[in-house]
Image (cartoon, helix red, strand yellow):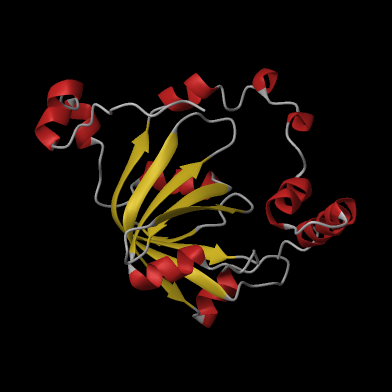
């Protein structure tokens, strides 16, 4: 184990700006108060968004949301609607939104290194007309998250290029990590029939994957 050492902490904005410098004019001006035509087209083509929330106590959570491209509905340039599809029922994001409505979104499009960031406030709704518009294969979500956009901007590709995220030559061989079922059993199961518990977990996960809506 690496021994902890004294940290050279930065504790005030002035010291941070002095070290990093000021953002360029274009980086400042690209922040918009609403979704323009390019942002709207990005949302329409995105099958995946990361939703960042925090609770009343300041503890943060980031939850992945994914579906067919365009699954996030843009009602207008200032309003987005995210369906809440079946999941693990922990409700981390939804409970956070009830306590603290401020959210951050990061939209991704596979194969595209640039991303779209959206910040605003959110509410959890169950309006029949909205849920019907979010239905897939005749199945509509029980709830939806309405995001009121306050700021948005397109983000450059540097982090994705450094990570080579979409480069299949750099994909990790799947067998370098255990299956999800095995990892969860290792984390949660009491001593006993470990292999049977893994089989049960794998079966349960497989069944949940077969019922996405």
184 in relation to 2, above or below: below
Q: Is residue 163 left or right of residue 173?
A: left
User: Picture coordinates of residue 170 (x, y %)?
Assistant: 65, 20
In front here: 55 or 104? 55
User: Picture coordinates of residue 99 (x, y %)?
Assistant: 35, 71
2 in relation to 184, above or below: above
Residue at image coords 33%, 26%: 5
- The single residue placed furthest to the left in the displayed view is 14
In front here: 130 or 204? 204
196 in relation to 26, above or below: below
Q: Is residue 203 left or right of residue 158?
A: right
User: Picture coordinates of residue 148 (x, y %)?
Assistant: 33, 63
User: Picture coordinates of residue 196 (x, y %)?
Assistant: 90, 56
Residue at image coords 32%, 64%: 57
Q: How many marks?
A: 0
Q: Is residue 113 left or right of residue 201?
A: left
Residue at image coords 44%, 73%: 124
* The C terminus lies in quadrant: bottom right
Residue at image coords 77%, 61%: 208
Task: Name which quarter of the figure residue 134 lies in.
Answer: bottom right
């Amino acid at each position: 184990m690496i021994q902890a050492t004294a940290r050279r902490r930065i504790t005030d904005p002035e010291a941070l700006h002095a070290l990093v410098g000021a953002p360029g004019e274009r980086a400042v001006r690209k922040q918009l108060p609403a979704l323009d035509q390019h942002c709207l087209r990005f949302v329409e083509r995105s099958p995946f968004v990361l939703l960042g929330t925090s609770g009343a106590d300041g503890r943060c959570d980031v939850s992945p949301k994914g579906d067919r491209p365009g699954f996030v509905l843009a009602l207008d340039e200032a309003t987005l609607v995210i369906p809440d599809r079946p999941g693990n029922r922990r409700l981390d994001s939804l409970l956070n939104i009830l306590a603290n409505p401020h959210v951050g979104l990061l939209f991704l499009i596979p194969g595209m290194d640039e991303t779209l960031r959206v910040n605003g406030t959110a509410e959890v709704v169950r309006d029949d007309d909205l849920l019907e518009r979010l239905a897939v294969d005749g199945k509509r979500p029980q709830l939806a998250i309405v995001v009121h956009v306050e700021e948005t901007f397109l983000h450059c590709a540097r982090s994705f290029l450094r990570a080579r995220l979409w480069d299949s030559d750099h994909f990790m061989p799947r067998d370098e990590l255990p299956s999800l079922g095995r990892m969860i059993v290792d984390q949660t199961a009491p001593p006993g029939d470990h292999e049977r518990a893994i089989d049960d977990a794998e079966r349960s996960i497989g069944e949940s994957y077969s019922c996405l809506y």
